[in-house]
Image (spheres, rainbow, N blue to C red):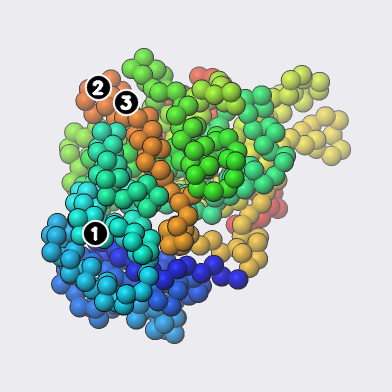
Amino acid sequence: MPISTPPTSIVIFGASGDLTQRKLIPALYNLCVRERLDPSTRIIGFARRPYSHAEFRTLMHAAVKQFTPASYSDVAWANFAPRLSYVQGNLNLAEDYTRLDEFLREREGGANISRLYYLATAPEFYAPCVELLAAQGMATEDTAPRRIVIEKPFGHDLASAQALNRTVLAAFAEQQVYRIDHYLGKETAQNIAYFRFGNTVFENVWNRNYIDHVQITVAETVDVGNRAGYYDGSGVLRDMFQNHLLQLLAQVAMEPPASFKATPIRNEIAKVLSAVRPLTPETLPEQVVLGQYTGYCQTERVRPNSRTPTYAALCLYIDNWRWQGVPFYLRSGKAMQTKVSEIAIQFREPPRAIFPPETRHSLNPDVLSLCIQPDEGIHFRIDAKLPGTIAETRSVDMTFHYADLGEFSTLPEAYERLLMDALIGDAALFIRGDAIEMAWALVDPIIAAYEQDDRLPVHRYAYGSWGPDAGHELLRCSGREWLNLCGTHPPGGHPH
Ligand code: BG6
């Protein structure tokens, strides 16, 4: 039974941009194919380029064909296309918002139609757009919900995120605001909570008594490519850690919420982020490694002597009863050897070694690995005795793959889920204002240490490698190593 969403005017600000074509329109098209959109729901593009409705539809047609080819059909497109229209306007001009509002009112025909404003613009337009929507009375919920989705980056540092929160919350109430992090829309990220709180087995060992450490890796093979101009002013801490990696950490480490609703979930996320021990000038050098791939400074639009890190590895601690003393190692980088997003949980060794010494040496700690992408699934590495031997053991891998779920094996794009949630008013997978600020407070000292002075070295690493040696040393110095179970399969295992 498809979940239906209420009749809504979805207004995409910055509709001529990349995000609209690559993600938003294909996701809305797929929601339409899956009968999730109400027949009265309309999608209105708003941007400066002078498109007619027909020209906008033609552009979006090409985007849908290109970015969601598997679900494309002429019939489905013909069904979707009439929902699209376009209003030309300047994001800084009040009268253009008035025109937009008139256009929407006419379309809505006085009916109680919800509105979803999607800010897919460059970040410098977030504040003016929000202010002008409020000034035109377009944020007021007289007859139906008015919601706003704000893309990342939400701020550039703590101070700018606080300022943006102030502006946004002067115009909209917190429950109208949907700050997006597309990692939370990924099925595999959502499954972390189901895995932990929907099974009794794991939650009992999900703490410092049983877990030695946790690793979160988000590695990409791509380099900064044609986003170099943006990236050089941003770097991996802003681009990946402040949002995606810290949100994954929160999913792994948070306490069970009282119910699976937005407020209790977001309370727990805020609680755990507020318990992450802040990095200080004294701890930074021991807990943070930065890297930059070779050739980065030769990229067009990158400053020739840029110190912007394209890789970082962090060791964080969470000061609460559950996690006291357990290191959380986080790493992410561009131009790495493999594309993989993985959470690996390494369990402690058994309290007493009862096997003969030769067996003991071949035993490995148990590892549970949650593979976010691309090998979506779960691996559990345990030791087993080799049949026919006296006491030889080997690590074996118990696996689950989404690909084996038959009719459910196709994973929807994160944006489909997030757009649907915003349409029905469920903010559980969106970031609350306080959590955004807490995440900035955690990464700000690292950014300051390499941007404002040279307190942190930025190590070079070979393009296509696993990052600088110092990133390995971060774990090695305590006898640990980075794990990569995603994509590994036991002999005769599943050939994904
Ligand atoms: C974005 C970053 O938020 O996430 C990009 O700005 C990065 O730099 C991307 O490539 C990674 O997302 P995904 O879904 O491909 O893992």
Q: Which badge, 1 or 2, is on the more N-terminal residue? A: 1
Residue corresponding to mark 3: 445
**Residue positioned 61% across, 64% down in the render:** 408
Callout 2 amino acid: Asp
The local secondary structure at tag 1 comes to: loop
- Whether residue 475 is visible here, answered yes or no, is no
Question: Which dot, 3 or 1, sits closer to the camera?
Answer: 1
Q: Quadrant of the C terminus?
A: bottom right
Residue that extends furthest to the top in the rendered view of this protein: 282
Residues marked 3 and 1 touching at CB (< 8 Å)? no
The local secondary structure at tag 3 comes to: helix
Residue corresponding to mark 2: 454
What x and y, as percent, mark residue 113?
37, 70
What x and y, as percent, mark residue 232?
24, 41
Q: Quadrant of the N terminus?
A: bottom right
Against 164, residue 493 (above or below) is below
Callout 1 amino acid: Gly
Q: Which quadrant of the view contains residue 350?
A: top right
Residue corresponding to mark 1: 137
